Amino acid sequence: MNDKEIEKKNFILWYGLYATEKELEVARLNNREILDRLLREYAEEVDKIDRTRSIYERMNQTGNRQTQGFDATLHIDRSSLKKNDLFEEDSVIRYEIR
């Protein structure tokens, strides 16, 4: 791994996992040129992080709502199958998945 790849990985990890608004502001004050360069070079990755963060924050804001449950019921109608010693005629088997 060369220096450029290490720089990219470090910046993306810092930006995605650790950089708060306060830390970004401090970085803008102390290292504006470097931060601007990194944001330009890795704009696509930064955009993905920002969109993901935005979706995550919206999900947390609506966290007081309950998530929709899922209840699946499978009905197997054996009356349409050939008669077989294992099954009674016109039987229906019901499975519930919770």
Image (tube, rainbow, N blue to C red):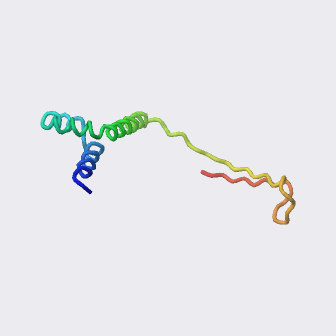
* Residue 19, image quadrant: top left
Measured from the top left, where is residue 42 in percent x and y? 29, 40
Measured from the top left, where is residue 75 in percent x and y? 73, 50
Question: Horizontal placement of 48 versus 8: left or right?
Answer: right
Name the one closer to the observer, 69 or 5: 5
Question: Horizontal placement of 95 versus 70: left or right?
Answer: right
Q: How many marks?
A: 0
Q: Residue at x 21, y 37 (%)?
A: 37
Q: Residue at x 26, y 36 (%)?
A: 40
Q: Residue at x 28, y 47 (%)?
A: 13
* Residue 48, image quadrant: top left
Relative to 65, residue 98 above or below: below
Measured from the top left, where is residue 2 in percent x and y? 24, 55
Which of the image's four quarters has the N terminus? bottom left
Q: Residue at x 22, y 52 (%)?
A: 3
* Residue 20, image quadrant: top left
Relative to 32, residue 76 above or below: below
Q: Residue furthest left?
A: 30
Measured from the top left, where is residue 46 in percent x and y? 31, 39
Name the one closer to the observer, 57 or 62: 57
Question: Horizontal placement of 53 versus 35: left or right?
Answer: right
